[in-house]
Amino acid sequence: MSQSAPPHQDAASTSRGIETAGIEIIGEDQRTARPRDLFLPWFAANISVFGMSYGAFILGFGVSFRQAVVAAVVGVIVSFLLCGIVAIAGKRGSAPTMVASRAAFGVQGNKVPGIVSWVTSIGWETSLAITAVLATATIFQRLGWSSGTTVKVIAAIVVAVLIVLGAVAGYHIIMRMQTVLTWVTGIVTVIYVTMTIPHIDWGVVTHLPDGPWQAGIGAMTMVMTGMGLGWINIAADWSRYQSRDASGSSIVLWNTVGGSLGPVVLITMGLLLAGSSQDLSEAIALDPVGALATILPTWFLAPFLLVAVLSLLSGAINGIYSSGLTLLSLGIRIPRPAASLIDGTILTIGTIYVVFLSPNFISPFQSFLVTLGVPLAAWAGIMIADITLRQKPYDDTDLFRSAGRYRAVDPVSMVSFLVCVAIGWGLVINQYEGVSWNDWQGYLLGPLGLGGRQGPWAYANIGVIAALVLGFLLTVIGRRGIVRRQEAMAPSTAVGASVATDR
């Protein structure tokens, strides 16, 4: 279509309380959020007791307690700090993350990382839904209620419906919902931690032997991909309602604190529990949240289940909401609620597959993290560098037209992305049970003298970090002049000419 301005969302952004805004630019009258408002969605989405499961995942790398704590704290904080930097794009462009990303990759070229982003979001939503279903079945069995296939089927349907309904409602309802969930989940989590302290065996935990330092890097990489990097492709979706004069450093701060606070505490507690009991650690691999409930008294199981499921749904709703926006950014012309419904259907199918057909939870989960973590890290490195190089807001109109300053395809970013992905996949491996079809990576570990697929670097999964750092460096070196020329151009809306826009 032809018009002299990009798609904008006017004041009527809701219908019967449901957000109707899609990927269009948020109008100035709607940009009323403050940086501290970002704390709630990030905190609520990451306060889930599922975070404790990472304690067992980390110790699975064969590291000591002190190595595990360093890997957890560094991995969590650094990854959410990167999320905070990407969130600045939301303020600058008043558009979702994968629309702002067009400035780096081109309006059409951005569809390549856009597909990766969409699949990643779907995968995360599905993993959270799976965890909720497995936890429900385990706790029902512990309570002596109905269990087995029937419970799992009903739980899968109910979980999927609740996630989709929350995502369809949109930004404003989700923000109000997160306020309640933050308090409820926070209080119950504190109670859980207090009740499980007697299960900690400090003598066993503190005598866990140190593992090779490469294993520590692998554990940290797993935490980064499972925490902040798992959200980084949607980081600007929540900040697009920030006022244009909001402080960029404050946005970074509240994103980082909100996202990191819960996981740092929860993972540390998970390390103490999993390190104290090998049986519990092994059970977590099969049913992350349900296993954590086995050490609770029966009277607390019902409230624990309720809050555990609600916290998982909180994260999944955030993901479905954003994956719907990503789907729209790929050129699918449907209402935002319909996009969330499509993603919800895919989530349901994925949940049924893992719950009923996969031998365990942890294998497909870690395989997913490693495989998609590489291209997501490559995109993040390029995007963060692009944000760092820019000094001005994005040109709203040119984010939606291939003939504008951002062009249809940015060849430097596209080549950088493909190179980073190829190198990254060559430095990670997938040898998890039940996912042998994905065992094709790690092809550079031998040629680069890192010991091959069985050497000490095999499980370090340095390909994720390599893709992130290399993407950043290639962009800073190769696109500095491009960004300067783009920002030197007059705003497209000031030219006064009719321009063609691409949704």
Image (spheres, rainbow, N blue to C red):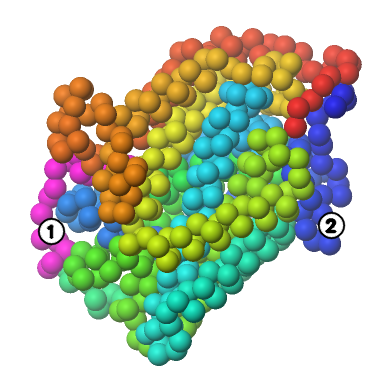
Q: Is residue 261 magenta?
A: no
> Residue sitting at 64 percent across and 61 percent down?
164
- Residue 320 horizontal side relative to residue 433, left or right: right
Label 1 element class: loop
> Is 1 positioned to the left or the right of 186 in the image?
right
- Badge 2, how many Cα within 10 Å: few under 14, some, many 20+? few
Residue 33 is labelled as none
As measured in the structure, the alpha-carbon distance from the residue carrying label 2 to the one carrying label 1 is 56 Å
Q: Residue 98: x, y in percent?
A: 61, 35
**Which SS class for mark 2?**
strand
At horizontal 42% and vertical 79% (from top left) the residue drawn is 148
Q: Is residue 13 above or below residue 197?
A: above
Membership of 204 in magenta stretch: yes
Inspect the image, locate mark 1, and give the three-letter code of the amino acid beneath it: Leu
Asked where in the image residue 445 lies, by quadrant, the reply is: top left
Question: What residue is shown at x 79% (from left), y 18% (from top)?
Answer: 492
Can residue 464 be seen here? The reply is yes
Rendered image: mark on residue 15: 2
Residue type highlighted by circle 2: Ser
Q: What is the magenta range?
A: 203-221
x and y, in percent, of residue 346 in the image: 57, 54
In the foreground, 184 or 279: 279
**Which residue sits at x=17%, y=64%?**
205
| Spot occupied by residue 374 in the image (x, y as percentages of width and height) | 40, 35
Q: Quadrant of the N terminus?
A: top right
Residue 128 visible? The answer is: no
Answer with the quarter of the image where residue 460 lies: top left
Q: Which residue is mark 1?
A: 208
Quadrant in which the C terminus is drawn:
top right
Earlier residue among tags 2 and 1: 2
